[in-house]
């Protein structure tokens, strides 16, 4: 009996030691996991702090770029528009004319040119019937009356959608307001970058010294080859806008090599009264786009300014985080 009791005692003692060792191992595992979690959380916090610092630096750089771009003595090809500091923080600035875009208010109200808007929509691949509906709805939105266009949309249509006091019956104040118009949700699906085509800030017609051949061809209803010829003349031998060899037109009737804008585009004389309100030269509204970067963080600031080289007026300023 004494031998059996001793064996039982030893067995229990070994068992207790095994349990204690197992408990210690479990405790070490838990502590290691807790330490690893703490390190990861600390690393995550450091990453957040680093991203915030870089984001702040990127925004500062973008603001500096805006200040440089707003200076009237700075030209489009000035090397100061692209700078990288010793710490790797940089900014890149683009000076663009707002006249390179179609002014939607001028299109609908000043020139009453709903047909050109329809042609733009057709060019994007939108079906003719739906393009007409959107064009009519656009005009209904900006005109001052409640008379509905043939395929348009007035107050009754928007009230059925639960949207009161629409349309606004005034010019668009921003491109975001255009998204409220009937059919624009479909347009946005087909043409996600439609905002690059329109503005509410330019002085009026499409600036032939600044616009792309694609837009000029639509506005003048000419072939793309003639529009390309016009763009090549303006940009000069180097093919880049904003350099010393540029040859911009001073007016629509100005001759370059003996030919006017209408002659280069081969616009028929009888059709010139239709095309003339659509076009312009030397629009005084400038878009300054500044992209600041620090590490992986990017911030973009866009400033729209009128009379940059005279008595400047800031029309719009927007900021965004760039992925």
Image (cartoon, grey):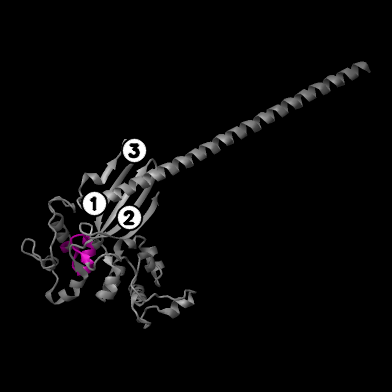
> Is 152 left or right of 261, judged from the image as shown?
right
For the residue pair 298 and 9, the one nearer the viewer reads as: 298
Q: Secondary structure at mark 1?
A: loop
Quadrant (top left, top right, bottom left, bottom right) of the N terminus: top right
Magenta residues, start to end: 206-226
Image coords of residue 217 (percent x, y): 21, 65
Residue 279 occupies which quadrant of the picture?
bottom left
Q: Is residue 32 visible?
A: yes
Residue drawn at the location 18% of the way across and 53% of the way down: 242
Mark 1, other Cα within 10 Å: few <14 / some 14–19 / many ≥20: few
Q: Residue furthest front?
A: 311
Q: Residue furthest top?
A: 3
Residue pointed to by mark 2: 302
The mark nearer the N terminus, 2 or 1, is 1
Q: Closer to the observer: label 2 or label 1?
A: 1
Query: In the image, which disc is placed on residue 88?
Result: 3
């Amino acid at each position: 009996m004494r031998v059996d009791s001793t064996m039982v005692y030893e067995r229990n003692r070994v068992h207790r030691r095994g349990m204690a060792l197992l408990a210690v191992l479990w405790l070490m595992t838990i502590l290691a996991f807790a330490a690893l979690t703490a390190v990861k959380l600390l690393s995550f916090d450091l990453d957040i702090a680093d991203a915030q610092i870089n984001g702040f630096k990127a925004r500062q750089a973008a603001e500096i770029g805006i200040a440089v771009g707003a200076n009237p003595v700075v030209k489009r090809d000035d090397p100061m528009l692209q700078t990288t500091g010793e710490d790797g923080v940089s900014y890149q600035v683009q000076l663009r004319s707002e006249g390179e875009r179609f002014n939607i208010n001028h299109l609908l109200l000043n020139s009453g040119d709903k047909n050109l808007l329809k042609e733009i929509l057709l060019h994007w691949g939108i079906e003719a019937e739906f393009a007409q509906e959107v064009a009519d709805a656009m005009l209904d939105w900006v005109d001052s009356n409640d008379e509905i266009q043939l395929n348009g949309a007035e107050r009754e249509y928007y009230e059925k959608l639960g949207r009161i006091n629409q349309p606004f019956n005034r010019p668009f104040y921003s491109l975001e307001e255009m998204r409220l118009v009937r059919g624009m949700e479909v347009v946005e699906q087909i043409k996600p970058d439609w905002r690059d085509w329109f503005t509410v800030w330019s002085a009026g017609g499409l600036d032939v010294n600044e616009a792309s051949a694609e837009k000029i061809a639509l506005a003048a209803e000419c072939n793309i080859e003639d529009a390309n010829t016009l763009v090549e003349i303006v940009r000069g031998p180097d093919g880049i806008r904003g350099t010393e060899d540029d040859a911009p037109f001073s007016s629509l009737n100005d001759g370059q090599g003996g030919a006017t804008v209408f002659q280069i585009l081969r616009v028929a004389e009888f059709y010139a009264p239709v095309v003339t309100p659509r076009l312009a030269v030397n629009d005084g509204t400038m878009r300054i786009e500044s992209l600041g970067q620090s590490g992986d963080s990017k911030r973009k600031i866009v400033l729209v300014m009128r009379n940059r080289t005279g008595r400047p007026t800031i029309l719009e300023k927007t900021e965004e985080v760039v992925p």
